[in-house]
């Protein structure tokens, strides 16, 4: 728990309620970060609706898993469009980041990434950004992902694996169908990991979990693990609807909201 | 200055770009994305209160009824989120912050404020950004009570700054004689957050 340091209210002034979960990014990442010209070194299809672009960065700041970058595109007439994308790669992938981008209907930036971007292109990026939805890997974590909400959480899984860490990590990943599941080949739990993959529309025959929305029964064992170890923190990422639903399930299962960090895609 | 991206054709030409959009923003039209770093709290109107204290002559709190007894206004202009979406027309209903501040009586030494939520989220604002008809406590959106995900039952509304300044589930304002960075500001975000100056992150 953080303590409020606000004293200027004077004697008899009630304390401002403290926001329980502290920021996690290293102070060195909180300074100014400039736009830079990154080079596309790989474009990889992940699912029918998602591609990963791997970028080489001239100026390298290792991110904390969970952080994001801004991507800016500029048309010949000077018109620009920029969006935020989570980094899916591990922080020790020196000199590189990987952004996994979902195609949005009519999306002018995601459409470009899917249809136009190719190896050798130069794209402007700025980051790493965001110091709250970030996991340095020092504490056990429960990660709850809806759709492309898996991207920043996969950076956490990869971070743990590349460091050979033994910190317990739990992942609940929700996708519409098996073909929509990002990073499927990496979603086999390693020692110290617990994974639950759920499908909301269609699953392979004989799949052990029911097809449908994430439910209390699925969350229960993960929430119990969080409650049994006070070091655990929880990261939820997905659409607004998913994040609201998952947050409610976790709180209903007894997880204090002060231990839950949420990132919503608009 | 940005350099041209090979093969990128925007949704508009630079000349067609809506002049109401600050630099780097796009028009989300009727979308109203939800962004917050925490689980949406269940806060009933009956449990809501708003307090103004710190460097004021008459620190006090208003409950739901008392706040609703103050003069109402609407705001129908643009809002801008630091994640790059803007919504050019809105319809918020609430009470101007000036009305609360007039009752509390800011001291001449007060220059800044920390706005805080019932969940402990904080943000810093210059008092000058909160006065003069530019800030409200909003209760309604498009004629209906603000939903919890959008900060209901009541949120701060400071639409001329990036929307992280418009604290959801607003609980109070503490007036100070100095600037004290809040939740996002200590996590790398700009202290003021003027969208027209593109003050997104530290050092912008």
Image (tube, coloured by chain):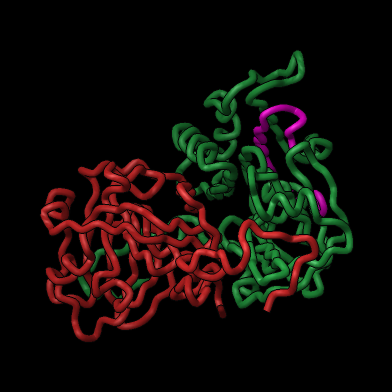
- Residue located 72% across and 69% down the image: A76
Q: Position of residue B158 (x, y in %)?
A: 35, 65
Let me know if residue A145 appears in the view.
yes
State which chain is coloured green. A
In depth, the one of A9 and B15 nearer the eye is: B15
Q: Extreme top residue here?
A: A206
When asked about the image quadrant of residue B122, the answer is bottom left
State which chain is coloured red. B
- Residue located 20% across and 69% down the image: B98
When asked about the image quadrant of residue B203, the answer is bottom right
When asked about the image quadrant of residue A212, the answer is top right
Let me know if residue B38 appears in the view.
no
In depth, the one of A106 and B57 nearer the eye is: A106
Residue B190 vs residue B55: left or right?
A: right
In depth, the one of A222 and A78 nearer the eye is: A78
What segment is highlighted magenta in the picture? A159-181
- Residue located 48% across and 47% down the image: B31
Is A94 in the magenta? no
In depth, the one of B180 and A5 nearer the eye is: B180
Q: Position of residue A118 (x, y in %)?
A: 85, 56
Tag count in the figure? 0
Q: Is residue B103 above or below residue B85?
A: below
Residue A152 vs residue B42: left or right?
A: right
Q: Position of residue A49 (x, y in %)?
A: 73, 39
Q: Position of residue B65 (x, y in %)?
A: 13, 49
Q: Is residue A201 above or below residue A68?
A: above
Is A180 in the magenta? yes
């Amino acid at each position: 728990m953080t303590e409020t340091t606000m004293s200027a209210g004077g004697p008899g002034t009630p304390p401002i309620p403290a926001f329980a979960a502290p920021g996690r990014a290293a102070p060195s990442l909180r300074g100014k970060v400039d736009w830079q010209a990154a080079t596309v070194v790989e474009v990889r299809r992940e699912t029918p609706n998602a591609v990963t672009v791997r970028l080489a960065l001239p100026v390298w700041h290792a991110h904390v898993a969970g952080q994001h970058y801004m991507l800016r595109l500029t048309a010949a007439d000077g018109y620009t469009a920029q969006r935020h994308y989570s980094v899916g790669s591990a922080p020790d992938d020196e000199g590189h980041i990987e952004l996994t981008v979902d195609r949005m209907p009519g999306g002018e930036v995601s459409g470009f990434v899917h249809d136009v971007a190719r190896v050798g292109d130069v794209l402007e990026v700025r980051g790493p950004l965001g110091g709250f939805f970030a996991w340095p890997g020092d504490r056990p974590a429960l990660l709850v992902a809806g759709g492309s909400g898996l991207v920043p959480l996969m950076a956490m899984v990869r971070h743990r694996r590349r460091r050979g860490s033994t910190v317990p990590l739990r992942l609940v990943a929700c996708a519409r169908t098996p073909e929509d599941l990002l990073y499927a080949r990496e979603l086999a739990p390693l020692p110290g990991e617990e994974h639950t993959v759920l499908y909301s529309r269609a699953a392979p025959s004989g799949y052990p979990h029911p097809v449908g929305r994430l439910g209390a029964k699925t969350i229960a064992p993960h929430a119990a693990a969080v409650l049994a170890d006070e070091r655990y923190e929880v990261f939820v990422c997905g659409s607004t609807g998913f994040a609201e639903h998952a947050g409610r399930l976790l709180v209903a299962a007894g997880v204090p909201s002060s231990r839950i960090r949420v990132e919503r895609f608009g | 200055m940005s350099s041209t991206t090979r093969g990128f054709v925007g949704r508009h030409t630079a000349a067609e770009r809506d002049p109401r959009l600050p630099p780097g923003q796009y028009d989300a039209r009727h979308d109203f994305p939800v962004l917050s770093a925490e689980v949406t709290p269940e806060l009933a109107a009956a449990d809501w209160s708003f307090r103004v204290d710190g460097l004021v002559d008459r620190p006090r709190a208003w409950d739901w009824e008392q706040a609703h007894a103050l003069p109402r206004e609407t705001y129908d202009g643009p809002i801008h989120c630091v994640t790059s979406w803007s919504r050019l027309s809105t319809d918020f209903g609430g009470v101007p912050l000036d009305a609360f501040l007039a009752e509390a009586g800011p001291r001449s030494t007060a220059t800044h404020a920390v706005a805080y939520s019932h969940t402990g989220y904080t943000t810093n604002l210059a008092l000058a950004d909160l006065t003069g008809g530019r800030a409200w406590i909003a209760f309604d959106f498009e004629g209906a009570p603000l939903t919890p995900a959008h900060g209901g039952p009541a949120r701060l509304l400071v639409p001329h700054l990036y929307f992280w300044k418009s604290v959801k589930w607003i609980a109070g304002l503490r007036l100070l004689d100095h600037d004290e960075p809040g939740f996002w500001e200590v996590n790398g975000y700009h202290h003021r957050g003027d969208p027209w100056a593109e003050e997104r992150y530290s050092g912008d």
